[in-house]
Amino acid sequence: MSKRTAGRRHFLAASLGLGGALLAPRVLGKSLPELLPPAGTRRVLIGGGGWGGLTAARRLRQLAPQLDVVLIERQAVFRSLPLSNKWLVDRTPDALSQQDYARVAGAHGYRVIRAEVTAIDRELRRVHTARGSLGYDWLILAAGIRHDYAAWFGDDVRATDQARRLYPAGFMADELDAVKRKLAEFKGGDLLMTIPPSPARCPPAPYERAVMIAWMLKTRRIRGRLILVDPGGGMQRFNRVFAERYKDQIVHLTHAPVKSIDPFTRTLSTEFDEIKFDDAILIPPQQAADLVWQAGLVGRDAAGRADGWAGFDPLHLHAIGDERVFLVGDLLGKASPLFGHYPKSAHLACHLGRIAAAEIAARAQGKLPQPQLPESICHVYTDAEPMEMLRIDASYRLRGDGLIAQTVRQHEDPQPRGEDAQWAQGLYREMLAPD
Ligand SMILES: Cc1cc2nc3c(=O)[nH]c(=O)nc-3n(C[C@H](O)[C@H](O)[C@H](O)COP(=O)(O)OP(=O)(O)OC[C@H]3O[C@@H](n4cnc5c(N)ncnc54)[C@H](O)[C@@H]3O)c2cc1C
């Protein structure tokens, strides 16, 4: 099958809801308005304005001002997940950063369209939204993750809706307010939180959240426990803190993958336990965002099954077999057989955004860019009072055999002085601030 035919087939499958992809029926059989007049120059569309998409947009304006850059984002404002855990329990007086997309785009000289992308036609190089469609010369997909509730509930829509509504994960920016409200209103009893299996967004984040919640229970003298249901063995540093400082607040069930959850009777089963809970933060397994499924770009495992994440060329970040589509951020699949996925961190998403922009800028000039590799820095609190921090750095190099190798270093900091906020300010300046 030719590449063009394959692209078309994926578009139709996605539109018809086949192969687990989302329905996008409005696109078929009805012509949609052009969202923007055709560009007088070549156009780059960016699907998703999180850390990766915003960085790519800004960098493209700097590297290739001759290109028309359009960001498509369903939210009106950008909100940060990094720094959110301490904000959830009021362990910081600082508000969570919120930035208006229209202001940021105006300041940097690109355009933003507030719309949900519903389908991607790679053969015709068009992106469809509920409001209309538009063509591209290059497309960057930077849409993050989706929650895989189907892993728990199959096609039971009622159970999925109930879990999403009453027990939101707080792992996407638009879920944060509901989790904050839930914690503010928690008066006691068993609060359950599931840890998502790997690969998942920011693996230390659920443990940091657990410490913050335990601190909240302790300092507010709430007669309640946080029950952590963890498919793995946890993280050494956190395991020690849970056991030594929060043994009355945290029950950590390790090596306990979720077997089933009933969000109506508030019951979770593992292989060994049946747990009743009073309230919960249910963080399901994760997959690449819908856009990756709509574009037919989900990778396959050795048995040919969809592995849930975007297949990509690790040296140039384009889709396998399609050098018009670039992939950035948490949605990526395995980068290397030596370590698997890149850490799903904001820092790394920003780096990938810069690299994708450099790739497109070079290609727009008819050049093939040199491969560049990202890095990741993640600050995570391992205790709330006194504040203690762990900094996790990951760096990458290309080995002689062409494979990417990873080095990870951890530094414990018993006296943090706002390094996480300084880190975020540095990236905000790049993504959000005017020149
Ligand atoms: C609690 C928590 C704490 C964290 N702490 C840190 C930290 O300290 N340091 C760190 O480096 N990382 C941290 N992370 C990880 C970080 O938030 C993610 O790695 C980062 O958000 C990934 O960026 P992204 O651009 O890939 O995706 P996102 O930031 O999720 O952006 C995706 C965007 O795409 C949009 N979108 C999706 N689908 C569509 C569609 N169909 N149409 C239009 N728009 C769409 C979404 O609205 C969203 O704005 C944390 C994560 C969590 C959950």
Image: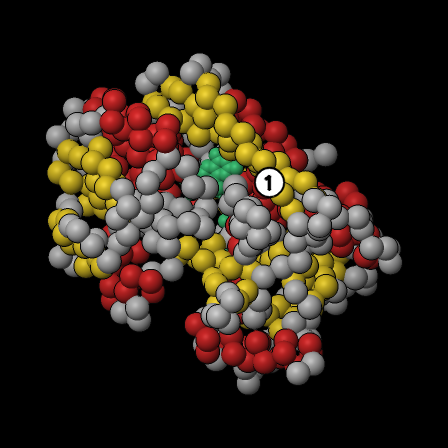
State which quarter of the image contains the C terminus: top right
364 on left or right of 261: right
User: Camera-side residue: 419 or 43?
Assistant: 419
Q: What residue sits 57% from the left and 53% below the top?
A: 337
Direction right: furthest residue: 366
Q: Give the residue type at disc 1.
A: Gln
Q: Is residue 171 rendered to the left or right of residue 249?
A: right
Q: How many marks?
A: 1
Say which quadrant the N terminus sits in.
Answer: bottom right
Residue 243: give x, y in percent of width and height: 25, 27
In depth, the one of 239 and 176 nearer the eye is 239
Q: Is residue 184 left or right of residue 3?
A: left
Q: Is residue 373 above or below residue 40?
A: above
Q: Is residue 175 visible?
A: no
State the image quarter where residue 326 is shown.
Answer: bottom right
For the point 64% across and 40% down, the residue is 396
Specify whether 54 is left or right of 137. left
Observer able to see residue 156: yes
Eyeballing the image, is 399 above or below 94? below
In the rendered image, residue 104, in percent from the top left (x then y), is placed at 62, 42
Colour setup of the view: secondary structure
Between residue 115 and residue 207, name the one nearer to us: 207
Spot occupied by residue 378 in the image (x, y as percentages of width and height): 51, 33
Q: Secondary structure at mark 1?
A: strand
Q: Residue at x 50, y 27 (%)?
A: 410
Q: Residue furthest bottom?
A: 29
Residue 124 rendering spot, x and y as whole percentages: 69, 75
Counting other residues with Cα less than 10 Å from the Cα at mark 1, is it few (<14), some (14-19), or many (20 or more)? Answer: some
Residue placed at 46% from the left, 41% from the top? 202
* Placement of 22 over or under 100, stated as above or below: below
Q: Which residue is mark 1?
A: 406
